[in-house]
Amino acid sequence: MNNIRLHVCMTGLHPERNFNNIKNLLRRMRGYNTNIDLKYHIVFKSNEPAAAQEEVLAPNMKERLQAEGLDNVNFFSYESSFLRRYGNAHRRHHPASLTIQQEPLREFVNREDILDSDFVLKTRTDIHIDDHFIDMFLDKNFYESLRATGGPYTVPGFEYKIWNSFISPDFVLEFTDYFFLARVKELKQTLVQSHEESEYLWHHPVNSAERVFPEKLQFIKPLLPILERADITSVRSDFYWDIVNDNFSISYYGVGSCQKDRPDLDRNRK
């Protein structure tokens, strides 16, 4: 496989309580002997209301990382088009959640220096990524294993599968958004382009029988034509898991309501 460039994109909110987690991830990834071209990015909104600024980015984070010898981090800010249009109207369990969650990666992958052949590891900064995942992400053979096989349910244009750490067995495409990895070309197909598109996905019949988790709707978008054609509304369809496995590489499958196989996440959550 040709040279691999991996962008580690830390998204969401980056308050003080996440600072040590950010340092820990950077140090562990920098400590590996790998021939993968690693780029590190902290992505944040530039127009968050003033009252929330210290949640968006901990004070003096760039200077503090530099003082720790972690000076190769790109701080990428973007203006939230949702906040510009609607003001501080972000609500949980609402289409606005999907719009807000999609903006950071959408703005990032649209940069001129980001190539369709690049890969992105997206992670929230309140999440701990265990070493065995880092071992995997920094092994070139892992990327070869993501090549799509062109199965009967592969999304048109998908040359690589999207990797995710966990999928629930209960609801359609209920992935975690904690961290996932995708090639930019495929990632672009998943990202919503407007709040109107978020509302359409939110109210789509594929979500009608369950409590909606905004993060999973990202992964539903490119599969909608396939899900609609197969009339998929639950995981109990004969074709559902074939559709999943044609387009995703998954480390952990949930078993019933038991979460014992779920990776150790949310270590910084209060």
Image (cartoon, rainbow, N blue to C red):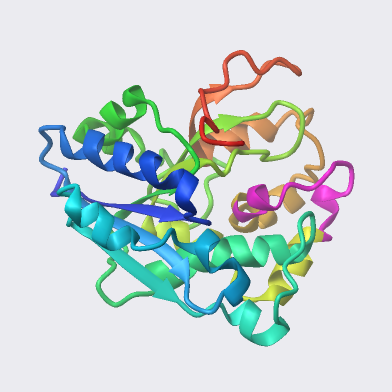
Q: Residue 139 lies in what quarter of the image?
A: top left
Left or right: residue 92 versus residue 30 is: right
At x 62%, y 66%, the residue is: 100
Query: Is residue 157 among what the camera can see?
Result: no
Left or right: residue 242 versus residue 7 is: right
At x 54%, y 79%, the residue is: 47
Residues 90 and 164: in front is 90
Residues 174 and 60: in front is 60
Relative to 270, does residue 18 appear above or below in the rendering? below
The residue range painted magenta reads 203-218
At x 82%, y 49%, the residue is: 207
Relative to 258, does residue 217 appear above or below in the rendering? below
Residue 209 shown in magenta: yes
Relative to 269, does residue 39 appear above or below in the rendering? below
Of the 4 image quadrants, the one containing the C terminus is: top right
Left or right: residue 204 versus residue 216 is: right
At x 68%, y 57%, the residue is: 225
Residue 73 shown in magenta: no
Residue 125: horizontal and vertical position, in percent? 45, 46
Left or right: residue 226 versus residue 186 is: right
Residue 70: horizontal and vertical position, in percent? 19, 50
Residue 249: horizontal and vertical position, in percent? 46, 33
